[in-house]
Each structure stands twice: as structure tokens, then as C-alpha cells.
Image (cartoon, rainbow, N blue to C red):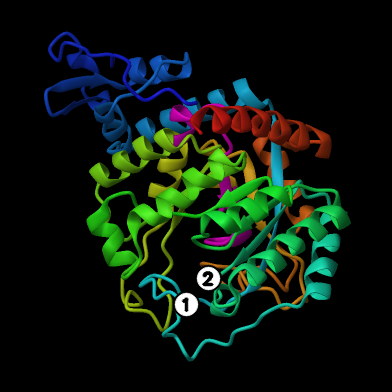
Amino acid sequence: MLPFFKASVPKMDYWVKRAGMEEIMQTESNVFYLPEVLQHLVSGGKADRNQIKFLLNLSHDADIEKLFESARKVREKHFGDKVFLYGFLYFSTFCRNNCRFCQYREANHALPRYRKNESDILAAAREMADTGVHLIDLTMGEDPELFSDGDNGFERLADLCGQVQQETGLPVMISPGVMPENALKMLSHAGVAWYACYQETHTKELYSRLRPGQDFEARMDAKRNAGKLGMLIEEGLLTGVGESVDDLATSMEMMAELDAHQVRVMTFVPQEGTPMSDIFPSNNLKERMIIAVMRLLFPDRLIPASLDVDGLDGLKGRLDAGANVITSIVPPKKGLAGVANNSLDIDDARRTHDSISPILDTCGLTVADIGAYASWVNAHMKTRMTVGVQDK
């Protein structure tokens, strides 16, 4: 279990450090000196809420670069120069929810939809595996066809996950929305390694605006239940949707409480056919800063650099911020969509292993062996299963 952020925070006398005023910030009753804060975290120290807010509020380019450099040091300490690759297979774009930020919301009737059949899913998964990805991410909306069929639908989903694992020899992550406990048990028995279910924000008021009609605690409970069943949890948040630094700090704290083994952030991309289509898009700096803070707070966990927001062009910046997983690798010409940008860089083959390699070289990084990722997953699943048994 990750320790909660409660260690003491380095403080400096404001007047003693006047020469370094650009690196000093007062947050509530605390005065922080950036080099000491970063050294504290790089050395394995824990953070508190005010320290999280201090780092997320950095504004000077030189200070932000120091944050990124510290995040890279922590990543190297725990993962060396190795990164992992995730194949992304969005197999159903039907959804019963009306999330205000998502183009796949039920009320968006102008958007073309698809449900991939079993043979297409397996063929795409095999192709991904042949390119050297470490995991197959099976993603769907909360497809009403599946949920209306009760246990039969969940059994089909669990069987599909098992077949993908058998065909590819790779771990599977399933992103199916909020699953009832009996469905989670089926997925666990099928050997599913990861359950991904993003809260997007952990502030209930903002959550209710982003996900109207969806129960906050039910979504959190699904992740807690999956963890008790031995699955690893991926938790995620969305930035650029009106969140405050306090909101982000709350999310960091709840991710720690959840003991998520993969934590991620994505920048909101306005979508046609949604109530948030007219929001001015943010650049990716805040996302990269959040990635770096996550790396300092969750040093030995997996943090994705998604190709879904800026495509290949945004990859280096996210890796330089401390990410160690490249997600949303999609085979071209398969009719598969992304999430934030449903077609960006897919059919021109820019979301592939070969396209990524030159960028990794510029970052001093390399793709890990398939066995290294499997070993990491298996070791953490064993630990998770032990914790789950103790929690029962």
C-alpha cells in the first residue's frame, strides 16, 4: 500500500533565502524553497497537500524544468531507461452515459458508432502483439447492449478477455466503465490484470458537472472491489475542465488512498456534439506538470504518456516530464478509434512502434523486454491479491 502523503515538508526562512526569491513560494502558512522540496522528494521523502499545490503552481520556465528534471531522476531510479508500450483497442463506441466532455456520449446521435466482432478484436490484438506492445488495452463505452444482458453480457466480456490473453500471450487491461461486483469477479477469474475506470476528478461537485447522473461512490467502489479481487487499478484525471489546484491535490491524495498502480492525466480536447464543445482548449503544459508531480508522488508506479491528445508530436514532452508508458498505440486501417482525438495519427501509421522509436532515442529511453513488464505486473498482482485477502 502506498503511504499517505504526511511527511514533514521542507520550509525555509523567507528572509534568509531572499537571493532565490523566484524559487520561493508562500502557500497558506508555509514557505517553500524549490530546490529543497525537489531534493526531499527525489530522495524518497513524502509530500503533503501544500507541497503538491506548490509544485502544481510553478510558473517560471526554469522552475518547471527543474520539476521535470527531478521527475526524470526518479523515473530512472525505479525504471532505468525502460518504457512500456500499450496497444489500444476501442472495441465498442456505444455508451449509455452522457458525460459532458465525451464525444461518445449517448446523446451525440451525429457520431458514427461501431461494435467490433470477436474475430476483428482478436485479429487486431494479434497484430498489436506482433509489433512488440506489452499489454492490450480493451476499451469500450458502457455499451447498453452488454449491460442490458446482465450476467450473459459480462460472461461474454470475460471470455473475450481470456481469448485475447491466450491469443497474444500478453496481459489485458479492461476499460469497460463501472462494473458490478459479480462482473468484476468474472474478469478476475478470467485472469484480467488491470481494471481501468477513470474518475476524471475526485471533487464531487466538479464530478457531478462532468458525469451527470453517475454516482461518484459507485465508481470509486468498483475500483476498490477490483483491487480486492487482485486486479491492478489504473486511475485517471482530466485537466482543462475548470479544475482548481485544490481539486488536483484532492485527486493525488485519493489516488494514493486507492493504491493505484497506474496513474494518468489527459488534457481535455473539446468535442463536437458535446455541451463542452466551446471550451477553449488548453495547451499540454499543465498535463506535463501533473505527470511530473505524479512521478514524484508515485515514484514506482506506471504513468502514461498518451498519444491520444497531441499524437506523436506531444510524446517527447510527456516522456521528458517523467512518464514511462506509451499508450494508445493503434494499428492503422482497422477502423479503430481513439478517445480524445478519434482519428489522430492512426491511419497514417504514426501510432506505431516504428514511429515511436526515434523519439525514444532523443529521450535516452528504450523499450523494455516483454518479460520485464510481465514480471512487474505479476509481482504487483501477487501483492495486490495478498492485500485483498487481508481486506476481506
| Mark positioned earlier in the residue sequence (2 or 1) | 1
- Residue 362 lies, with reference to residue 52, above or below; the image says below
Residues packed near mark 2 inside 10 Å, few (<14), some (14 to 19) or many (20 plus): many
* Along the viewing direction, whichever of 264 and 116 lies nearer the viewer: 116
Name the mark on residue 142: 2
Residue 303 visible in the current orientation: no
Q: Is residue 310 magenta?
A: yes
* Along the viewing direction, whichever of 27 and 223 lies nearer the viewer: 223
**Count of labels shown?**
2
Residue 68 visible in the current orientation: yes
- On the picture, is 53 further left or further right than 172? left
Residues packed near mark 1 inside 10 Å, few (<14), some (14 to 19) or many (20 plus): some
Q: Residue at x 75, y 58 (%)?
A: 352
The quadrant where residue 112 appears: bottom right
In the image, the segment drawn in magenta is: 294-315
- On the picture, is 231 further left or further right than 202? right
Quickly name the residue at label 1.
96
The quadrant where residue 336 appears: bottom right
Tags 2 and 1 touching, CB below 8 Å: yes
The quadrant where residue 127 appears: bottom right
Name the mark on residue 368: none
- Residue 385 lies, with reference to residue 100, above or below; the image says above
Q: Pinpoint residue 119: horizontal percent, then vertical percent.
A: 84, 74
